[in-house]
Amino acid sequence: DAAAIAGQFAPGGSMQNAGQPAITGREAIRRFLDGFSGYRVLAAEMSVVSAQAGPGREPGVERVTQTGRYAQTVRAPDGRRLQAGGWFTAQWRHRPAEPWLLERMDTSPTPPPDLPEPP
């Protein structure tokens, strides 16, 4: 549901796959995701490796950054099964009386260089 996923982003939120231009704004994100409407996710897994919380730059705004791995098995429109996976970094924000929204979602085939060491 491209519209529902895009609605999880802040109005000026963005998503970016390593090496590609960022896609910014809910409408642009929805249009991008609509391009995959013929694909079907058969299996998906996400695991968080690191989560860091703290105040935002604006008073009363909270922020959480999650980093982790993802893997998907997808059926393409032509029937082929495809495997996709890698690393993600999700930056969330929360304001009073609003839901948590994604400010940025980045994906990459390699772990981010600033990934904290596990305890």
Image (cartoon, rainbow, N blue to C red):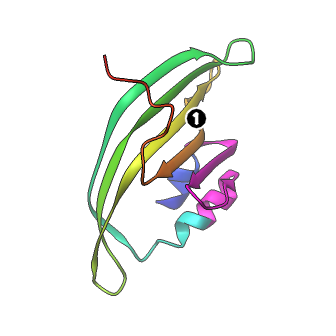
The picture places residue 58, in percent across and down from the top left corner, at: 75, 17
Q: Which residue is mark 1?
A: 101
Instruction: Point out residue 20 in the picture as x, y percentages from the top left corner.
Output: 61, 62
Towards the viewer: 2 or 22? 22
Report the number of discs: 1
Residue 79 vs 53, above or below: the answer is: below
Whether residue 110 sits left or right of residue 59 in the image: it is left
Query: Residue at coordinates 43% horizontally, 25% vertically from top-left?
Result: 116
Q: Is residue 47 above or below residue 78?
A: above
Classify 10 Å Cα crowding around label 1: few (below 14), some (14-19), many (20 and above): some
- In the image: residue 20, left or right of residue 11: left
Q: Which residues are magenta?
A: 8-31
Q: Position of residue 27 (x, y in %)?
A: 68, 58
In the picture, residue 23 is in which quadrant?
Answer: bottom right
User: Is residue 19 highlighted in magenta?
Assistant: yes
Q: Is residue 45 left or right of residue 104?
A: left
**Rendered residue at 28%/82% (across/down):** 80
Q: Residue at x 54, y 73 (%)?
A: 35
Which residue is drawn at the image coordinates 43% and 35% (left, top)? 67
